[in-house]
Image (tube, helix red, strand yellow):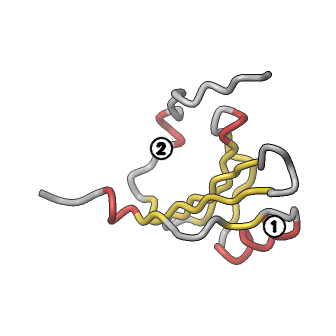
Amino acid sequence: MQRTDTTSFLAPDQVKDSWSFLEVWVDPMQSPPYVLLLLGDTEGCYIFDPAERYQVVKAFQSYEAAQTWLLEDEFEPLEGRLASSEIHQTT
């Protein structure tokens, strides 16, 4: 069985404080389901692949374009969205 290191961190240039939301998308036809992450920020939307050390798979100028690409590849969104405001709270 192949093991994936889930403790790896993103390279500093891939992490921005300006992100606004994160969604998890899965391909339920695979076993186990394949997971991709959709991150939105002020410049667009980015698809990250956790199985590929969180590499950016694709970049889009709009959420609608990213959503269309994922749906065409038969990915489905998990219910819910994580907003940056839920994590970045000022004290």
Asked which quadrant contains residue 20, the reply is bottom left
- Is tag 1's residue or tag 2's residue first in the polypeptide sequence? 2
- Residue at the far left: name it: 91
Image x and y of residue 69, in percent: 81, 67
Q: In the image, is residue 23 above or below residue 56? A: below
Asked which quadrant contains residue 87, the reply is bottom left
Label 2: element kind: loop
Task: Report the Cα–Cα distance between label 1 and label 2.
Answer: 23 Å
Label 1: element kind: helix
Q: In the image, is residue 54 above or below residue 35? A: above
Residues packed near mark 1 inside 10 Å, few (<14), some (14 to 19) or many (20 plus): some
Q: In the image, is residue 51 above or below residue 84? A: above
**Depth order, front residue of 52/46:** 52
Query: What residue is at 70 percent from the left and 77 percent from the top?
Result: 64
Image x and y of residue 10, in percent: 53, 35
Name the quadrant of the C terminus.
bottom left
Tell me the residue that label 2 is attached to: 15
Asked which quadrant contains residue 71, the reply is bottom right
Query: What residue is at 65 percent from the left and 32 percent from the top?
Result: 53
Give the numbered dot on residue 24: none
Tell me the residue that label 1 is attached to: 69
Query: What residue is at 73 percent from the left and 57 percent from the top?
Result: 26
Q: Judge left or right: residue 59 versus residue 17.
A: right
Image x and y of residue 24, in percent: 62, 58
Residues packed near mark 2 inside 10 Å, few (<14), some (14 to 19) or many (20 plus): few
Amino acid, disc 1: Trp
Image x and y of residue 65, in percent: 74, 73
Query: What residue is at 55 percent from the left and 64 percent from the top?
Result: 40
